[in-house]
Image (cartoon, helix red, strand yellow):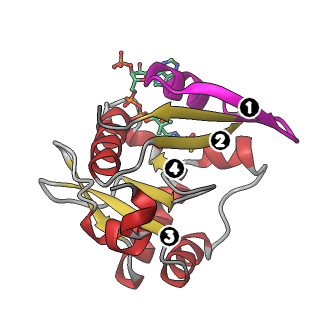
């Protein structure tokens, strides 16, 4: 069975994205303030990619979008030991086509970057999506985000294309053999 046969909504409810140190909690209204703090805690990312800090409604907008689209899944990443959220994960299932999942955003507060959380979260995403029948994980990075390009390449993602405005598309095959 592949992802499209099972239906994205059904697959999504089965996704278990918890890692060894972080729980991935489906984002809801109650998480907006913590998510917004994570976004505002990563000013370098927004300066590089958007040229300005995140807007005051950025986190609420993410939750709105995920609630409106059954293929869109936004998670807040929370330490299992407790404490405030350290990051945000935004996934588009069956995008741009069946069997592919696109990482719209994986972001940690700057104080929580470089601690291995990204690698752990991506491993959990790969495992859960492969188990659910997805065969490809995809994402795009703007040229200005040099660190993110190095991170994804370190995790085994390969460049598969270039879009207008200096965006590189990366993919990694995740299908279970
Ligand atoms: C990019 C990001 C998600 C990476 O998560 P992270 O927790 O900081 O990265 P990790 O600590 O898990 O690093 C994993 C590996 O990538 C390597 N890596 C990370 N950043 C790197 C860089 N700039 N250059 C070279 N290697 C890098 C690490 O050395 C580590 O290597 P290892 O396998 O030998 O341990 C995080 O830094 C972040 O939130 N950045 C801002 C938002 C962003 O740019 N998101 C990506 C766009 S969608």
> 105 or 35: which is nearer to us?
105
**Which residue was labeled with disc 2?**
140
Mark yes or no: residue 73 visible.
Answer: yes
**Which residue was labeled with disc 1?**
161
Of marks 4 and 3, which one's residue comes earlier in the chain?
3
**Which residue was labeled with disc 4?**
100
Q: Which mark is residue 75?
A: none
- Measuring from the top left, give residue 13's x and y in whole percent: 29, 71
Q: How many marks?
A: 4
Element at label 4? strand
> 63 or 51: which is nearer to us?
63
Q: Is mark 2 within 8 Å of ligand 1?
A: yes
Which is in the foreground here, disc 4 or disc 3?
A: 4
Which is in the foreground here, disc 2 or disc 4?
A: 4
Label 1 vs label 2: CA separation? 9 Å
Q: Residue at x 48, y 77 (%)?
A: 70
Q: Is mark 3 within 8 Å of ligand 1?
A: no
Label 1 vs label 4: CA separation? 15 Å
Of marks 1 and 2, which one's residue comes earlier in the chain?
2
Label 2 vs label 3: CA separation? 18 Å
**Which residue was labeled with disc 3?**
71
Element at label 3? loop
Magenta region, residue range: 145-168
- Measuring from the top left, give residue 91's x and y in whole percent: 48, 58
- Measuring from the top left, give residue 174's x and y in whole percent: 39, 36
The C terminus is located in which quarter? top left
């Amino acid at each position: 069975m592949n992802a499209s046969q099972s239906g994205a909504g059904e697959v999504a409810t089965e996704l278990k994205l918890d890692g060894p140190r972080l729980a991935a909690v489906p984002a809801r209204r109650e998480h907006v303030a913590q998510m917004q703090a994570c976004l505002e805690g990563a000013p370098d990312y927004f300066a590089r990619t958007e040229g300005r800090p995140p807007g005051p409604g950025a986190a609420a907008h993410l939750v709105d979008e995920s609630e409106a689209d059954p293929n869109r899944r936004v998670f807040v990443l929370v330490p299992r030991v407790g404490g405030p959220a350290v990051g945000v994960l935004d996934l588009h299932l069956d995008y741009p086509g069946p069997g592919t999942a696109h990482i719209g955003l994986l972001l940690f507060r700057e104080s929580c970057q470089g601690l291995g959380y990204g690698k752990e979260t991506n491993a959990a995403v790969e495992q859960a999506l492969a188990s659910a029948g997805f065969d490809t994980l995809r994402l795009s990075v703007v040229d200005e985000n040099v660190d993110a390009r190095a991170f994804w390449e370190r995790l085994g993602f390969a460049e598969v294309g270039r879009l207008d405005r200096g965006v590189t598309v990366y993919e990694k095959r995740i299908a279970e053999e």
